[in-house]
Image (cartoon, rainbow, N blue to C red):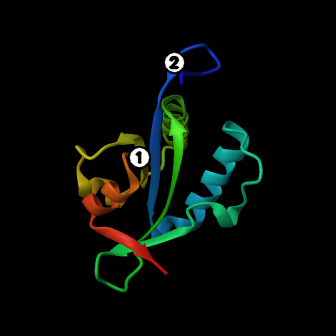
Amino acid sequence: MQAFDEFGREVFPVVINTICPVAYAEPARQLALRHMTTVEQASGDTLGRMLDINLGPIGADEITHVFCSRNAYTHQVGMVVEAFQQESLPWGGTRAYSLLSDREEVKRMFCVVLGPTSVVLNWLGLEVKP
């Protein structure tokens, strides 16, 4: 099955994993909600659904990050990256990261990491916390 963006360019499926240090959780959730409702025009999103998964180091009780993951298409990655760039946050990423990126840089930023969620979390040394 092929998919195309609004300009007729072919797009491909990806998994967008959005991560943020817990210290920036509240402003990050506000930004995520604004992006999803105004840029991507998603209906039904609420603040409580943004970055609603807690993460922490594997085997520890500490919560260090908030997280969400979604199936999307390549053009949506560009939309998210553009939103990060426009915000110019000192704690915000300005590109999409991958498993080839600097892991410690990713862990310091509110950013997106592309790849299967379980692989990304393992690469970061993080797991879901209650």
Residue 61 versus residue 115: which sits nearer the camera? 115
Q: Earlier in the sequence, mark 2 or mark 1?
A: 2
C-alpha gap between disc 2 and disc 1: 25 Å
Instruction: Give the residue drawn at x 60%, y 22%.
Output: 5
79, above or below 29, in the image? above
Q: Label 2: how many residues lie within 10 Å, few (<14), some (14-19) or many (20+)?
A: few
Amino acid beneath label 2 = Glu
Residue 105 versus residue 5: which sits nearer the camera? 5
The circle on residue 93 is: 1
The circle on residue 111 is: none
Which mark is nearer the camera, 2 or 1?
A: 2
92, above or below 108, in the image? above
Which element carries disc 2, helix, strand or loop?
strand
- Percent coordinates x, y for residue 91 in the rendering: 42, 55
Q: Residue furthest top?
A: 8
- Percent coordinates x, y for residue 2 in the rendering: 54, 21
- Percent coordinates x, y for residue 122 in the rendering: 28, 62
Amino acid beneath label 1 = Gly
Q: Label 1: how many residues lie within 10 Å, few (<14), some (14-19) or many (20+)?
A: many
Q: Quadrant of the N terminus?
A: top right
99, above or below 63, in the image? above
- Percent coordinates x, y for residue 36 in the rendering: 66, 46
Residue 112 versus residue 87: which sits nearer the camera? 112
Q: Residue furthest front?
A: 1
The answer to whether mark 2 and mark 1 are in CB contact below 8 A is no
Which element carries disc 1, helix, strand or loop?
strand
The circle on residue 10 is: 2
